[in-house]
Image (tube, rainbow, N blue to C red):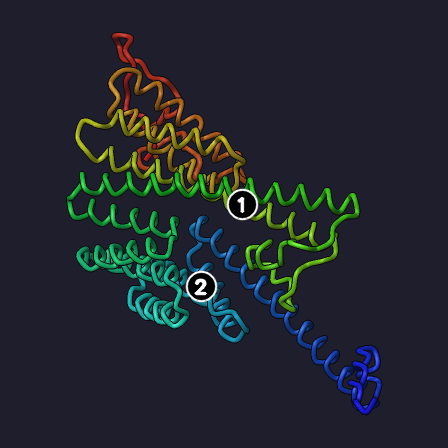
Amino acid sequence: HGRELNPPPANPATCDASPDGAQTAAADATVLARQMKEDRANVLALRALQDKVTEASTLFWQGAYRDAVALLQTVAEEAHDTPRGQVIECEALRMVGHGLIRLRSFEPAGRCLETCLALACALESTSLEASANIALGQLAGAMMDHSKAQGHHGHARKLAREAGDVAGEAAACLNLANTLIKQGEKEEGLDAMGQALELRRRQVADAGAALAGAEATRVRVHKEAVSGNGSGEGSPSADSADGGSSGAGVNGGWATAPEERERLAFSAAADARRTLAEARRAEAAALANVGSATCALDGREVEAVSHFTAALALLRDKAIDLTDRELETVILINLANISEHYVPQGGHTAAVGHRRELDALIRSAPGGGGKRCIPDSCAICLDPLRALEVIEDGSGAQGGEATVG
């Protein structure tokens, strides 16, 4: 009819049928495969570095500061040369600084922490910046510059609150409280300790809610996998399911295979359980810190005992690991000494009970506890200590000076 018809649309299946199109598609597939391989290698490298950081944390709890510092220095160097390793590098530098403070190597600690702070600012991470300020405050406190320490801890608390970092704000409160107590401001320090405790309890509540959500997702994904209805729609990506640490989902997409989705959901639930356990340990430690601060005030020793007892009960309510064992040891020592010296009625008997628990706990450790066990005699005069016996004076009343230092 004198009118030209529009040509039919090209068939997508034949668009790249030419030799040039096939070569381009093959090249693109090769590039994608190489990128995925590199991403997987990077994920494994980051995971290995994070495992070393965890190992260093254990060394800190064991008091092996030199070994921890040496390991963390290696981690920082390797993370510096690893793609997307800046966050781990920053954390390793902070922990190196902390270890150097414990070793009283203040000058290198200062250089290390300033580098850590600069990296945190470059990453524009408010939480990392807050952590670096806490460490710098600890350094200033160790050097007896309490005014500077207070400034760092106050700034860290402000940064953590802005970032919504409850754990970071609690840590800043704790360090601020310790600084205030060292300056003789005991009541203000106790108040800050109480604020830190409330933040830790909020952290536990948040972690509990996160675990409930992760468990619900795990159950749902498992049911979908069993029934064969897992379509992948709305499934957690690797970054969301594994806290960003597993590094799966290297091509930035969603996990669609039912088995992969189930693995990611299981990993997310396991991470959430660990996070909740760590939050509960932190709450127990905060309770113990409140006990220590309360004991520093005249006439409030019995109240301090109640805080330590509550911390011990909270700690024993969950599975024991190395961190729990060390904290439990500290709490039992404090309970024994406070009960022995400051609780008039039944204090000695309670103290002996705590020392017996302490001795059993230490002896149950790998290697039998060694020199950490409560000795039978004084190392100086060789007289028997009888620290694990209830001693009665001539009137039948309980007394004695068998204590654990």
Q: Amino acid at mark 2?
A: Ala
Tell which tag, 2 or 1, sits nearer the viewer.
1
Which of the numbered marks, if any, corresponds to residue 274? Answer: 1
Which of the numbered marks, if any, corresponds to residue 124? Answer: none
Q: Is residue 156 left or right of residue 40?
A: left
Q: Would you name the residue on which mark 2 appears?
A: 92
The quadrant of the image that shows the C terminus is top left
The quadrant of the image that shows the N terminus is bottom right
Residues packed near mark 1 inside 10 Å, few (<14), some (14 to 19) or many (20 plus): some
Residues packed near mark 2 inside 10 Å, few (<14), some (14 to 19) or many (20 plus): many
Tell me residue 317's x, y (percent): 49, 30
Tell me residue 209's x, y (percent): 50, 41
Give the secondary structure at mark 2. Answer: helix
Q: Amino acid at mark 1?
A: Arg
Residue under the point 54% across and 36% down: 319
User: Which of the 4 image quarters holds residue 117?
Assistant: bottom left
Residue under the point 18% across and 38% down: 187
Q: Residue furthest left?
A: 184
